[in-house]
Structures are given as structure tokens and as C-alpha cells.
Image (cartoon, rainbow, N blue to C red):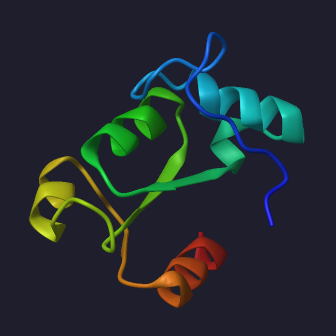
Amino acid sequence: MFDAVLGESDICPRKPDPAGFLEICKMLGCEPSDAVMTGDSPTDINAAKNANARFVSVLWGYRSREALTEAGAEALAADAGELYDIIMSI
């Protein structure tokens, strides 16, 4: 279940613009620095950096561990259970 979902639109430009993430934070009443963004690409990492948010890269997407690490990934999750554990430890 999701509390909010946004896709590319007039108020949500393409990442790495952080506007979509920031709008979701606003909708949920939280600060970006208190949220965690997840994704599978360097573009996602850059969107989180642009929002001053924490980020966890997932390894079941389109990019390799090496590509994500080179892009600045600090936390990498191999599966949903590991993603949950990382988010809960932040």
C-alpha cells in the first residue's frame, strides 16, 4: 500500500529534479531529511541528493552494484527484506 504516488507531470518533472519527492513529503507532512528514497538508478540517487534526503539503492533494477556505487550509493539492498532492514536502521 502507498500513501501517495506521483508520476512525471507539470508538478513532478523528470528526475533528478526532486520536485516529485518533495511534493510527496509535503503531502505526507514530513521533512525530506526525515524520509528515505529508494531507487535503482544513478538518476534516483541524484534526485535524493537534490532533495537532501537519505537514499537506499536496490539491486533488482536496471543498474549494477558497480554503477550504483560509482554514482554515490551508500546503502544497497539485494531484496525487499534487506531494504526494510536498512530503512528501519536509519
Q: Residue at x 79, y 58 (%)?
A: 2
Residue at 29%, 57% (x, y): give it. Answer: 73
Q: Please provide percent x and percent y for residue 46.
A: 35, 35
Q: Is residue 47 left or right of residue 61?
A: right
Q: Residue at x 55, y 26 (%)?
A: 8
User: What quarter of the picture does the C terminus occupy?
Assistant: bottom right
Q: Quadrant of residue 85?
A: bottom right
Left or right: where does residue 6 sit relative to residue 76?
right
Q: Is residue 64 above or below residue 29?
A: below
Nearer-the-camera pick, 33 or 10:
10
Q: Residue lying furthest top in this view?
A: 10
Choose between 72 and 80: the one closer to the eye: 80
Q: Residue 45: name its quadrant.
A: top left
Examine the rendered structure and indicate whether residue 53 appears above or below residue 10. below
Report the residue that reaches farthest toward the bottom.
81
Quadrant in the picture for the N terminus: bottom right
Residue 82 is situated, as x and y percent measured from the top left of the image, at 48, 86
Q: In this picture, is 55 found above or below 15? A: below
Q: Position of residue 65 (x, y in %)?
A: 17, 69
Left or right of 76? Residue 31 is: right
Q: How many callouts does the rendering have?
A: 0
Q: Residue at x 35, y 57 (%)?
A: 40
Dividing the picture into quadrants, the one containing residue 43 is top left
Q: Is residue 10 left or right of residue 2?
A: left
